Image (spheres, grey):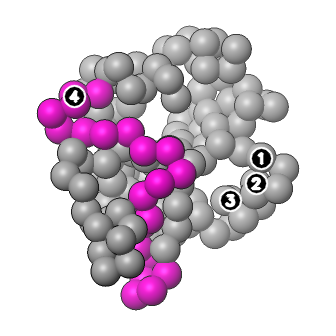
Amino acid sequence: MAQLLPQLDAARFELRMNAPTLQISPGTYLIPDVAVVPNRGLTDETGLENYEDPLLFVAEIWSPSTGIYDVDTKFPEYRRRGDCEIWRIHPRDRTVIAWTLQPDGSYTETTHRSGIATVGTLPGVRIDMDRLFE
């Protein structure tokens, strides 16, 4: 997600990779592969950076060892949390499936294979799919 970092407003957001914990219930957390978090570090009593509130962007990168867990467990929990934009990046298939939260609480699903994809929850952020899969 090297394309994402230089496009973020550093005064407002930070990019995290395998770092923040996202609370899904008391004592239960998920760690996304990539997340954009508010530029205000939150740590809980364990010293972990923990977010109970929905994030603007989370992404998982498919791998053979975690792909089923991500689909069956993580993505439904991200939607239940109300995370605003959720991406599943599949390098082998060269696809990105993006779920974007709508005002009524539902999600729209968009599949990207090439060209430029915008991150709707991060104004001005655009990801070149061809560069992403190089």
The x, y position of residue 37, in whole percent, is 31, 48
What residue is disc 4 on? 9
Residue at horizontal 84 percent and vertical 50 percent from the top: 64
Say left or right for 45 vs 29: left
Which mark is nearer the camera, 3 or 1?
1
Does the magenta segment cover residue 78? no
Local packing at callout 3 (Cα closer than 10 Å; few below 14, some 14-19, many 20+) is: some
Q: Are the two marked residues, 1 and 2, in contact with CB atoms closer than 8 angstroms? A: yes
Local packing at callout 4 (Cα closer than 10 Å; few below 14, some 14-19, many 20+) is: some
Tally of numbered discs: 4
What residue is disc 2 on? 67
Q: Quadrant of residue 25?
A: bottom left
Classify mark 2: helix, strand or loop.
Answer: helix
Does the magenta segment cover residue 13? yes
What residue is disc 1 on? 63
Extent of the magenta region:
8-28
Q: Are the two marked residues, 3 and 2, in contact with CB atoms closer than 8 angstroms? A: yes
